[in-house]
Image (cartoon, helix red, strand yellow):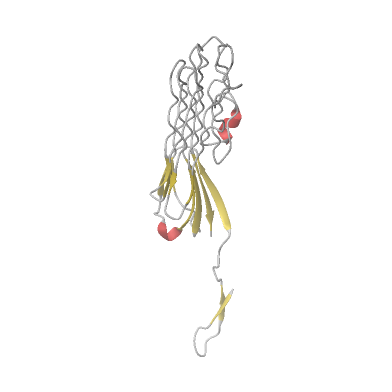
Amino acid sequence: QVLTSAGAGAAAAWEAAGGGGGYIQMQVFTSSGTYTPHANTRIVKVTVTGGGGGGGGQNTPTNERSSGGGGSAGTAIMDISIDDLGSTETVTIGAAGAGGASGENDGGTGGTSSFGSHCTATGGTGGGWGKPGTAGYGGNAGLATGTGAIQLRGMPPFDSCRPWDDAVAAGHRMHSCWIGAASYWGTQYYGGTDASKDNCPGAGGPAFPENAGSGYAAAGYAGSAGICVIEEFE
């Protein structure tokens, strides 16, 4: 409350100060759409993540070859004043990178997510099929942009794609970087179809882990789609 003078001879009045600063609500976009600020919004905190890359496809193992997991997407985090927002803002959510088809096929690249023209986060690239005598290579990390934003780079799969026992002779399985890379939100479990992958936007998809000796080809798993989380404050 603020005591305001109405001038000489008039009674002073108490009025609301309007200091604000309180949390209003959170809007979450898991598909592209249009953001409309709450009427009382003074500032928003935006977290946007691109789509994760897909895991590489697996061919019938013949020489210790295997496929790699997808890279994870970048994430941008920034505060934006209502004065810098339009009456609405376009939200684009990057699609998940597809898993590589069964055989010697790379996974797909995840799509780019964005919040208007304020910030973007690119997707991770797909994992690849290994060359003869080598493990598959993991996908590359996505990036983030935005003036004043925290720009978090994604990750490649954690493992360095080395042989399981540092041998490439027939009969020795390759360890491979088959597990998809973790995003800002977490990582998928092996298999990519577990419901938990929906809680890890931007994560890379796994590749099929059983390589030499398994005797059959298998498709890689898709990455996780992106997300945009908007927290509104008075």
- Name the foreground residue: 182 vs 228: 182
Q: Residue at the location (46% across, 34% down)?
A: 140
109 versus 232 height, above or below: above
* Image mark count: 0
Q: Residue at the location (52% across, 10% down)?
A: 216
- x then y, percent, for residue 198: 56, 32
126 versus 4 height, above or below: above
- x then y, percent, for residue 32: 43, 39
User: Which quadrant, please, contains the N terminus?
Assistant: bottom right
- x then y, percent, for residue 148: 45, 55
- Extreme residue in the top direction: 215
- Name the foreground residue: 130 vs 45: 130
54 versus 62 height, above or below: below
- Name the foreground residue: 30 vs 39: 30
Q: Residue at the location (52% across, 83% down)?
A: 5
Residue 112 occupies quadrant: top left
- x then y, percent, for residue 89: 41, 49
- Extreme residue in the bottom direction: 9
